[in-house]
Amino acid sequence: MTELLEKVITELKKLPPDQQDAIASRWMDELKDEQQWTERFESTTDEQWDNLAEMVRQEISNGETTPLDKIFPVNS
């Protein structure tokens, strides 16, 4: 176990049980989500990645995307 995780668990132990359970529940959901993403990425074939890339290129070509600087403007 990492030092940071041990530190977090030490702090969690100071909380009331209901708060500990609430945080533990969020962690479990996050872990499950991360496992699902990992499984999906690992099972994606090169052909699927190629198809996805082509779809993105087509959307960009058709003007169906929003430039990032419109979503996240750069403050000069």
Image (cartoon, rainbow, N blue to C red):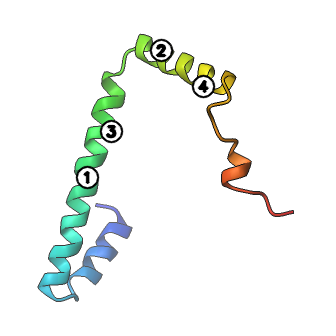
Q: Earlier in the sequence, mark 1 or mark 4?
A: 1
Give the SS element for disc 3.
helix
Q: Residue under circle 3?
A: 37
What residue type is disc 4 on? Glu
| Labels 1 and 4 touching (C-beta < 8 A) | no
The mark found on residue 31 in the picture is 1
For the residues labelled 2 and 1, the Cα–Cα distance comes to: 29 Å
**Mark 2: few/some/many CA within 10 Å (<14, 14-19, 20+):** few
Q: State whether residue 5 is above or below residue 48.
A: below
Q: Residues within 10 Å of mark 4 (few under 14, many from 20)?
A: few
State which mark lies toward you, 4 or 3. 4
Disc 2 and disc 4: Cα gap in Å? Answer: 12 Å
Residue ranking furthest to the right: 76
Identify the residue position indicated by label 2 in the image: 51
Mark 4 residue element? helix
Q: Foreground mark, 1 or 4?
A: 4
Tell me the quarter of the picture where residue 35 sits: top left
Q: Are marks 3 and 2 in contact (CB under 8 Å)?
A: no
Three-letter code, disc 1: Leu
Crowding around mark 1 (Cα neighbors within 10 Å: few <14, some 14 to 19, many 20+) is: few
Residue 3, position in %: x, y? 36, 68
Q: Can you tell which mark lies on residue 59?
A: 4
Q: Earlier in the sequence, mark 4 or mark 3?
A: 3
